[in-house]
Image (cartoon, rainbow, N blue to C red):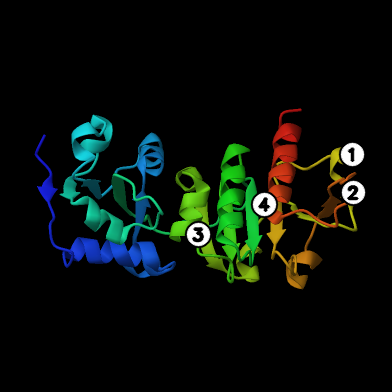
Amino acid sequence: MTAPSPISSKDNPLLKQLRLLSQDSTAYRKIGRVWLEGDHLCRALLDRGQTPAVAVFTESHWPQADERLRYSAPLVHTVPDRLMASVSGLESPAGVGFVWELPEAPAVLSDVPTVVLDRLQDAGNVGSVLRSAAAFGFRQVLALRGTAALWSPKVVRAGMGAHFGLRLIESLSGEDLECLQVPLVLTSSHQGDWLHQTQLPWPCAWVMGHEGQGVGPALAERASRWVRIGQPGGEESLNVAAAAAICLHASAVASQL
């Protein structure tokens, strides 16, 4: 086990790259890497059998860091705490971060449980939907153009590690979904069967639409089924991330019956 290589200059090329990855929501598309900051995300990557390209520790954290994290990457660096703060996207900079090489974009699978994101704008919502998808057995998430960048720092943090258990494909058009052989299920606040009373298909593709506009007309025309969530409290509608969690859980339960 080799000792970590120290970095002391703010102009170090790696630190410049980390600043770009942490501050630009789409920089990962050009660089082909993502910056995973914090113990939880780093462990989530390792738990999925993945290997980071680079591990970066603050000088203060290195002596107490878990050996699983310390020796998980072929390249390991330590940096002064102030330099980690300069690349951090967190209010309280973490003591460890990984650089991970993004895999090649996979092909769309036609017959697996899927979630389709139709122009969801809010990074927190997108990350939350990914967490629900991973938790409830949906293997694939397809993001249409206009959806928040799936590997942006905010979405990755909101996903809390769910990214590494999903088949993620983004920047798709409606035509790219024509290969899906599973039923498309859409939610509505004013039409369709009540979720708690209907028999849901499995596998299926749940379509989650734009926070304000909902699902676009082209996908709406292709819907195999519309469902609505009972809201006895009388609210007009639910946040899309909350609606997704309810719907995906209902599918997961139905798949076990």
The residue tagged 2 is 193
Disc marking residue 197: 1
- Residue 31 horizontal side relative to residue 251, left or right: left
Q: The N terminus is located in which quarter?
A: top left
**Residues under labels 3 and 2: Cα distance?**
31 Å
- Per the image, label 3 sits on a secondary structure element best described as loop
Disc marking residue 18: none
Spot occupied by residue 224 in the image (x, y as percentages of width and height): 81, 55
Disc marking residue 241: 4
Q: Is residue 137 above or below residue 242?
A: above
Q: Amino acid at mark 3?
A: Leu
Q: Residue at x 34, y 50 (%)?
A: 93
Q: Amino acid at mark 4?
A: Ala
Mark 3 vs 4, N-terminal side: 3
- Residue 211 horizontal side relative to residue 7, left or right: right
Q: Which residue extends farthest top?
A: 257
- Residue 26 horizontal side relative to residue 13, left or right: right
The residue tagged 3 is 150
Q: Is residue 28 above or below residue 66?
A: below
Tell me if label 1 and label 2 are in contact, CB under 8 Å. yes
- Per the image, label 2 sits on a secondary structure element best described as strand
CA neighbours of label 1 inside 10 A, class few (<14), some (14 to 19), many (20+): few
CA neighbours of label 3 inside 10 A, class few (<14), some (14 to 19), many (20+): many
Spot occupied by residue 87 in the image (x, y as percentages of width and height): 30, 60
**Residues under labels 3 and 4: Cα distance?**
15 Å
Residue 88 appears in the rendering: yes
Q: Residue at x 30, y 43 (%)?
A: 51
